[in-house]
Image (cartoon, rainbow, N blue to C red):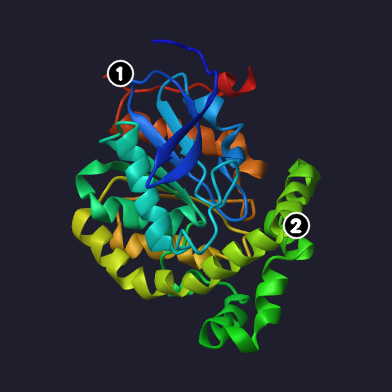
Amino acid sequence: MSTSATTTYKHVTADGVGIFYREAGQSDAPTVVLLHGFPTSSRQFDALIPLLAPYYHVIAPDYPGFGRSEAPPPSSYEYTFDRLSRTIQCFLAEIGIDRCSFYLHDYGGPVGFRTFLAKPERLQALIIQNANAYDEGLGAKWAAIRDYWEAPALHTDVAEAFLSLESTQGRHTLGSAHPERYNPEIWEDESARLAQPAQRDIQSRLLYDYRTNVASYRAWQNWLRARQPPALIVWGRNDPSFVAAGAQAYLRDLPDAELHLLDAGHFALEEQLDEIALLMLSFLGKHLGTQGDPIAPKRDLLDT
């Protein structure tokens, strides 16, 4: 087996949109698809990918309107979670991924759930990191966002606050016990991108459409309860947006899932990368093996 952790950077057209993605590992190894959150991109997985790639084929796309993927205007591309998922389904078909495990973070939750509910046989295992699917997982800020859903024209201030520099930084650092582990260039880059008029339009539309995700929670829960996919839940317990109760709620429908509440915030990889990588390698090795063999990861792999 190759021990190369080299990441390659690629483009492909899917659903009529240019999609940028990161890829690493051997193509004949089990595939892990990493679905990023808001307002970032597959860049959030830069440090995780080399830790998985010696064992797995790793794919991390940018959604349309995010990162280095194409951002067509809303007049030609409908910015909804249904459409993002359709595009990701087309992307996976285009690059030939029929079976895979998914890592869901934040917006990766609604994109991912729609993707594997559309083709359940695709899913091998599930890693859930601060990707909410339960009402009790929504933190206090969601009360104002619900007001925005009810009357967006009357609550434009909610969308403005959601896209502000303060909120963008807060998604990384609020609740963090380790603020020194966060690179400020990341949220500065994210904020600069969000300040672009086209991005504000795109992201406001997705924020409004997020209401469809909450309306879908019951269907997703029913699917999990019926299907019982192998699941690892790694959750930054200090996240003020998707609170720890949302992680614990998964156990109602997935009683055999592994649950780990970590001393981290919303972007838990930035604080607990080594711990999450080890948990993932152990979990995936148990359920998928690697090239047919189970994994016995060693902590010193992460220290090289």
| Label 2 – label 1 distance at C-alpha | 40 Å
97 and 276: which is toward the camera: 97
Quick check: 192 above or below 291? Answer: below
Q: Under tag 2, what secondary structure?
A: helix
97 and 278: which is toward the camera: 97
Q: Position of residue 259 (x, y in %)?
A: 43, 51
Question: Disc 2 marks which residue?
Answer: 169
Q: Quadrant of the N terminus?
A: top left
The residue carrying pointer 2 sits among few (fewer than 14), some (14 to 19) or many (20 or more) residues within 10 Å by Cα, namely some
Q: Are marks 2 and 1 in contact (CB under 8 Å)?
A: no
Q: Residue at x 30, y 57 (%)?
A: 254
Left or right: residue 233 compared with residue 50: left
- Residue furthest front as drawn: 75
Q: Position of residue 23 (x, y in %)?
A: 48, 27
The residue carrying pointer 1 sits among few (fewer than 14), some (14 to 19) or many (20 or more) residues within 10 Å by Cα, namely some
Q: Residue at x 31, y 19 (%)?
A: 28
Q: Position of residue 68 (x, y in %)?
A: 59, 41
Amino acid at circle 1:
Gln
Q: Residue at x 44, y 30 (%)?
A: 58
Left or right: residue 254 compared with residue 269: left
Residue 291, numbered label? 1
Quick check: 10 above or below 100? Answer: above
Q: Is residue 174 visible?
A: no
Q: Position of residue 130 (x, y in %)?
A: 52, 56
Of the two numbered discs 2 and 1 on the same chain, state the one appearing first in sequence: 2
